[in-house]
């Protein structure tokens, strides 16, 4: 009696011979599995990289101990709640920002900010739809604004509405290719600004490109664009780990400014780091939800291709299977060999798909500015899915092969 190990070896050897005897059929099945596994791994890796880079860029853009007072925030708000807030909450004005700063008590640093989309030009070059931010010099103390060269504008420049600007990496690359932008002149809303600082490349946060920003003093911004509907006031505690106390003081000061008595709701919103991170997390989850149906559809298409191909293989080998049955092969052995054949195809295709996904992600890392690589966990469950798909695709053809009548099969030419 043959040992189970010898039976398994014979099954694998027979499956391998069948695959090598039909390279075109084998290659077609492997390609289908490779495309499915490669798509699944690439989508999962891309979404993981997107979530990671978004969290990192969000931390840089907002800060871990920074909060903001604004008219309304859309975080966790339904349409009705948003409409109610817009009706109840008046705009946040420059006088509100000055009141907050006057009663900061040395515990909180504030920086009002207004934003407008505008074209930025220099010479014959134009950067379209830049995010122009009018703000206070104190913003650099509140948010982690990293400068590659130059400096942020000073308090005295803010007070006298100096026409100076700090530009993002994309703006500088478009307007000043191959040269240092510091000291150069740009035009915004018909006014000339001198570049005093170049921001280091930041990437994106929540789908917002941070390298399209231009920072100018808020009074200069208002002279160029006029008053804004409502400001955002960014804030930060002056001491480490003072976020709760700083937020409480800012909220109470703003309530005093609005003359809100006890029990009355705030007529403004406070955006905290937790709210900003939860928004990014929800965005990543919504984008990631699309990966499941994409992966399932790709694997189903691969299963259909492999199943059809294996049915053709079984039909072409009817006489061979009949001879083997007549010589003593059991139905179980026939089923095992066909399943081994489809399983080997699936695993080989899965490995090829993972290799292609790794090459693709490595090539995309540079242009996207995000480190992308197929994680071991992603590779493991992708190969597991490939193997399961191969077995699922081979099950019906294997059952068909095991039911072949040996007498009828031997008579077939």
Image (tube, rainbow, N blue to C red):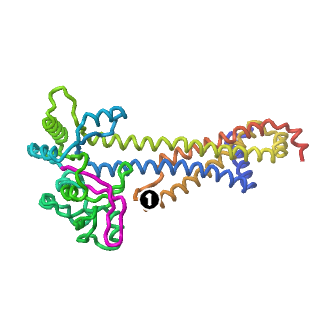
Query: Residue 31 appears at what percent x and percent y?
Result: 64, 53
Q: Residue at x 55, y 41 (%)?
A: 293
Q: Nearer the viewer, residue 276 or 83?
A: 83
| Whether residue 313 is situated above or below residue 255 in the rendered picture | below
| Whether residue 204 is situated above or below residue 250 in the rendered picture | below
Within-10-Å neighbours for mark 1: few <14, some 14–19, many 20+: some
Q: Residue furthest right?
A: 411
Residue located beneath label 1 in the image? 365
* Count of numbered marks: 1
Instruction: Tell me the chief SS of the magenta region.
Output: strand
Asked if the stretch drawn in magenta spans residue 175, the answer is no
Side of 388 relative to 11 (left or right): left
| Whether residue 195 is situated above or below residue 262 in the rendered picture | below
Query: Residue 136 appears at what percent x and percent y?
Result: 18, 54
Q: Nearer the viewer, residue 107 or 213?
A: 213
| Whether residue 285 is situated above or below residue 176 in the rendered picture | above
Task: Report which quarter residue 399 is drawn in.
Answer: top right
Q: Residue at x 22, y 68 (%)?
A: 194
Task: Report which quarter residue 241 is drawn in.
Answer: top left
> The N terminus appears in which quarter of the rendering?
top right
Please state the extent of the stretch shown in magenta in the rendering.
111-133
Query: Residue 110 appears at what percent x and percent y?
Result: 17, 48
Query: Residue 355 appears at what percent x and percent y?
Result: 55, 56
Asked if the stretch drawn in magenta spans residue 118, the answer is yes
Q: Provide the secondary structure element on which disc 1 rests.
A: helix
């Amino acid at each position: 009696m043959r040992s189970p190990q010898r039976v398994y070896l014979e099954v694998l050897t027979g499956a391998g011979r069948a695959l090598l005897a039909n390279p075109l059929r084998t290659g077609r099945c492997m390609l289908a599995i490779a495309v499915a596994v490669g798509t699944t791994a690439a989508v999962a890796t891309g979404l993981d990289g997107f979530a990671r880079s978004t969290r990192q860029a969000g931390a840089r853009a907002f800060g871990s101990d920074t909060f903001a007072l604004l008219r309304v925030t859309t975080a966790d708000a339904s349409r009705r709640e948003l409409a109610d807030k817009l009706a109840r909450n008046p705009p946040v004005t420059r006088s509100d920002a000055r009141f907050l700063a006057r009663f900061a008590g040395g515990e909180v640093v504030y920086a009002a900010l207004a934003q407008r989309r505008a074209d930025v030009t220099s010479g014959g070059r134009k950067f379209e739809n830049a995010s122009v931010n009018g703000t206070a010099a104190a913003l650099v103390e509140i948010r982690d604004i990293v400068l590659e060269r130059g400096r942020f504008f000073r308090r005295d420049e803010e007070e006298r509405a100096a026409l100076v600007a700090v530009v993002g990496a994309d703006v500088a690359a478009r307007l000043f290719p191959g040269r240092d932008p510091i000291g150069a002149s740009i035009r915004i809303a018909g006014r000339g600004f001198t570049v005093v600082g170049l921001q280091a490349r930041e990437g994106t946060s929540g789908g917002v490109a941070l390298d399209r920003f231009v920072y100018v003093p808020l009074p200069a911004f208002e002279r160029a664009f006029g008053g804004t509907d409502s400001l955002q006031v960014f804030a930060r505690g002056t001491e480490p780990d003072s976020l709760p106390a700083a937020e409480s003081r800012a909220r109470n000061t703003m309530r005093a400014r609005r003359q809100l008595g006890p029990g009355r709701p705030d007529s403004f919103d406070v955006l905290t780091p937790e709210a900003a991170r939860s928004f990014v997390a929800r965005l990543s989850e919504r984008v990631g939800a699309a990966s499941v149906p994409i992966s399932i559809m790709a694997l189903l298409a691969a299963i259909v291709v492999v199943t059809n191909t294996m049915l053709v293989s079984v039909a072409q080998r009817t006489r061979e299977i009949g001879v083997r049955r007549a010589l003593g092969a059991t139905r179980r052995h026939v089923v095992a060999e066909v399943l081994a054949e489809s399983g080997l195809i699936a695993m080989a295709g899965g490995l090829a798909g993972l290799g292609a996904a790794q090459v693709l992600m490595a090539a995309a890392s540079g242009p996207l500015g995000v480190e992308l690589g197929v994680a071991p966990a992603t590779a493991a469950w992708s190969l597991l899915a490939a193997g399961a798909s191969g077995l699922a695709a081979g099950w019906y053809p294997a059952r068909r092969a095991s039911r072949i009548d040996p007498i009828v099969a031997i008579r077939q030419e």
